[in-house]
Amino acid sequence: MSALDALEQRLTELEVRLTFIDETVQALSAADADQAVRMASLERIIRELRSEFSSLRLGQGHDPHGEPPPPHY
């Protein structure tokens, strides 16, 4: 095997590795974008649930923060 053949083989191996790395980066980027969308959706749901919970608490006329502490405090 000549030096030129060895160099060509190393270059081919590097190209294959680069292709694999590029595909991996693209897959991770897509997964990151998907996670960002899901996280935004979950944050919206949490805000809605907090709002509903506050409305329910106010609708019952019972605010635990306004109650005096129990006698043992």
Image (tube, helix red, strand yellow):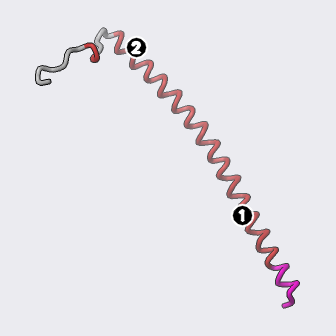
- Residue 25: image quadrant is bottom right
Verify whether residue 21 appears in magenta: no
SS label for mark 1: helix
Across and down, in percent, residue 49 comes to: 44, 24
Image quadrant for the N terminus?
Answer: bottom right
| Residue at the (76%, 63%) spot, across then down | 19
Across and down, in percent, residue 50 comes to: 43, 22
Q: Amino acid at mark 1?
A: Phe
Across and down, in percent, residue 55 comes to: 40, 14
For the residues labelled 2 and 1, the Cα–Cα distance comes to 53 Å
Side (left or right) of 14 relative to 59: right
* Vertical relation: 1 (above or below) 31: below
Residue neighbourhood size for the residue with mark 1, other residues' Cα within 10 Å, grouped as few (<14), some (14–19), many (≥20): few
Which residue matches tag 2? 55
In the displayed orientation, state which residue is furthest to the left.
Answer: 72
Q: Are marks 2 and 1 in contact (CB under 8 Å)?
A: no
Which residue matches tag 1? 20
| Residue at the (57%, 33%) spot, across then down | 40
SS label for mark 2: helix
Q: Earlier in the sequence, mark 2 or mark 1?
A: 1
| Residue at the (79%, 78%) spot, across then down | 10
Image quadrant for the C terminus?
Answer: top left
Side (left or right) of 71 relative to 7: left
- Residue 12: image quadrant is bottom right
Q: Which residues are magenta?
A: 1-9
| Residue at the (27%, 13%) spot, across then down | 66
